[in-house]
Structure formats: structure tokens, C-alpha cells
Image: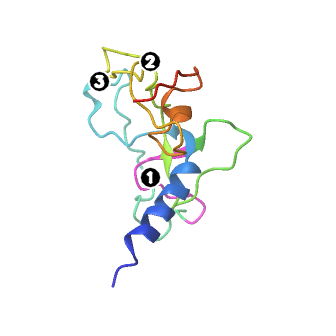
């Protein structure tokens, strides 16, 4: 049985509000060297095979996709496995941006008494607003 929708939504919102701004670091494992400026590495003649029981894998941290997410701000802790992360800041939605298809919020009707997304404080992006009784 699934938890109530409201509980799931609240948990996701908490994670969204605490999302970490990250930058990828490390190397992608790319077996296609068509775009590489370096010649392919030649295997060493007496090297122990990579999947041998003698290879030292226990000291290497495994990253599933070949890179590690580091906090954009080095003073912040790295994100955990359940943390939400983002690479880029979202565009502003207050001002019109035709390149991104953003209409902006100028001229929109808002609810002066609402604290939600339809409220004038949020929708007018702190610019101030005029009230009009209809």
C-alpha cells in the first residue's frame, strides 16, 4: 500500500527545497576514442588483468557512471544518495524571455489575500502591485 499522496508530495517538496547545486567531476569511461586527442593506451605486457583477484579494487571508490557529483560550493557537503541535485539554476519566470518561451508575470491577475503561488507577493516577484476591486 502506498502512503497518501499528500505525504509523498510533502517529502518530495522537502527534498526539492534542500536540493544541492552540483558539478560533475571525474572522468567518463569512454571507449570510443574517435574524438580523443590521445593515442589509445597500449596494455602493459606483465600487467595483472583488471578482473583478477590480485587487482586492488578495495581502495577504489566505485562510481556507477564514471563521475562523482561534487558540491558547486566546496564549503558544502557532497550530496547523499537520496538527495536531489541540479547542475544549473532555473531561469527566472518573472520577466519575459521569448528564447525560453517564458511569458513573465507582468499584467497577470493575482489574489491579494493568498499566500500561495496565485498570491500577489509571489506572482509579482517583489516588484509591487496595484489592487483593483472588480
User: Circle 1 sits in a helix, a strand or a loop, which is it?
Assistant: loop
Most distant residue in the bottom direction: 1
Instruction: Specify the label residue 46 is tagged with.
Output: 1
Q: Position of residue 105 (x, y in %)?
A: 41, 23
Q: 34 and 18: which one is in front?
A: 18
Separation (CA) of disc 3 from disc 2? 40 Å
User: Circle 2 sits in a helix, a strand or a loop, which is it?
Assistant: loop
Residue 73 horizontal side relative to residue 66, left or right: right
User: Circle 3 sits in a helix, a strand or a loop, which is it?
Assistant: helix
Who's the residue at 60% across and 61% down the image? 59
Q: Quadrant of residue 32?
A: top left
Please report contact status of discs 1 and 3: CB closer than 8 Å, yes or no: no
Mark 1 surroundings within 10 Å by alpha-carbon count, few (fewer than 14), some (14 through 19), many (20 or more): few
From this view, report whether residue 37 is shown above or below residue 58: above
Mark 2 surroundings within 10 Å by alpha-carbon count, few (fewer than 14), some (14 through 19), many (20 or more): some
Q: Is residue 68 magenta?
A: yes
Magenta stretch?
58-69
**Mark 3 vs 2, N-terminal side:** 3
Q: Position of residue 35 (x, y in %)?
A: 29, 24
Most distant residue in the right direction: 75
Q: Main secondary structure of the magenta part?
A: loop
**Mark 1 vs 3, N-terminal side:** 3
Residue to which mark 3 is pinned: 35
Instruction: Specify the label residue 95 is tagged with.
Output: 2
Q: Position of residue 55 (x, y in %)?
A: 50, 63
Separation (CA) of disc 2 from disc 1? 63 Å
Q: 67 and 33: which one is in front?
A: 67
Who's the residue at 46% across and 37% down the image? 111
Amino acid at each position: 500500500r502506498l502512503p497518501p499522496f499528500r505525504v509523498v508530495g510533502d517529502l518530495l517538496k522537502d527534498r526539492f527545497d534542500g536540493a544541492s547545486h552540483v558539478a560533475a567531476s571525474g572522468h567518463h569511461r569512454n571507449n570510443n576514442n574517435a574524438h580523443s586527442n590521445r593515442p589509445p593506451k597500449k596494455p602493459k605486457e606483465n600487467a595483472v588483468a583488471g578482473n583478477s583477484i590480485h587487482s586492488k579494487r578495495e581502495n577504489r571508490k566505485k562510481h556507477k557512471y564514471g563521475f562523482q557529483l561534487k558540491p558547486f560550493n566546496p564549503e558544502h557537503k557532497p550530496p547523499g544518495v537520496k538527495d536531489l541535485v541540479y547542475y544549473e539554476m532555473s531561469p527566472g519566470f518573472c520577466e519575459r524571455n521569448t528564447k525560453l518561451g517564458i511569458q513573465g508575470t507582468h499584467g497577470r491577475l493575482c489574489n491579494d489575500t493568498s499566500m500561495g503561488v496565485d498570491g500577489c507577493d509571489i506572482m509579482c516577484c517583489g516588484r509591487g502591485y496595484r489592487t483593483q476591486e472588480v
